[in-house]
Amino acid sequence: MAKGYWIGRVDVSNDEGYKPYAVANGPIFKKWGGRFVVRAGKFTTVEGQSRTRNVVIEFPDYETAIACYNSPEYQANIKVRQPHSIADLIIIEGYDGPQP
């Protein structure tokens, strides 16, 4: 079964205001089996536009990734983030087929 992923790109305007959101995410993601694959590491934009932070979170499957996003806990945490950042977030199903 293919895994599910959140791919997020974020510009934070207030680091102190954003911190409670980041701290609260740990228990939420753990509850849904999420784990960070990428978390604000060094990057180079080679095409298009970027934001200052990037994140990829892996979940057991696409349905679980959607359920985590829609959970009451995460929906409440979005309200903590929004005044302090601008974010783009997609939820995508991973590829589980043959590789070259």
Image: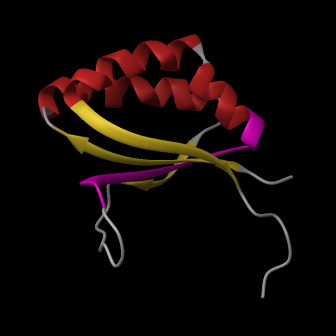
Residue at x 35% of width, y 16% of height: 79
On the question of residue 64 being in view, the answer is yes
Q: Which residue is at a point 47% across and 42% down the rendered structure image?
A: 89
Residue 46 picture location, percent across and down:
34, 79
43 vs 81: above or below: below
Seen in the image, is 15 located left or right of residue 93? Answer: left
Q: Position of residue 39 (x, y in %)?
A: 39, 52
Question: What residue do we see at 67% from left, 32% from top?
Answer: 66
Counting from the top left corner in percent of width and height, residue 41 is at: 32, 61
The range drawn in magenta is 50-63
Residue 20 seen anywhere in this rendered image of the structure: no
Pick the quarter of the image with the C terminus: bottom right
- The image shows residue 63 at horizontal and vertical percentages of 76, 35
Between 99 and 85, the one lying in front of the other is 85
Where is 24 relative to 7, above or below?
Answer: above
The residue that appears at 31% across and 63% down in the rendered structure is 49
Q: Quadrant of residue 20?
A: top left
- For residue 22, above or below residue 97: above
Q: Tell me if 1 is positioned left or right of 35 in this view.
A: right
Asked whether, in this view, residue 75 is left or right of residue 13, the answer is right
* Residue 67 belongs to the span the image colors magenta: no
- Front residue (pair 96, 29): 96
Q: Residue furthest front?
A: 48
Is 57 included in the stretch rendered in magenta?
yes
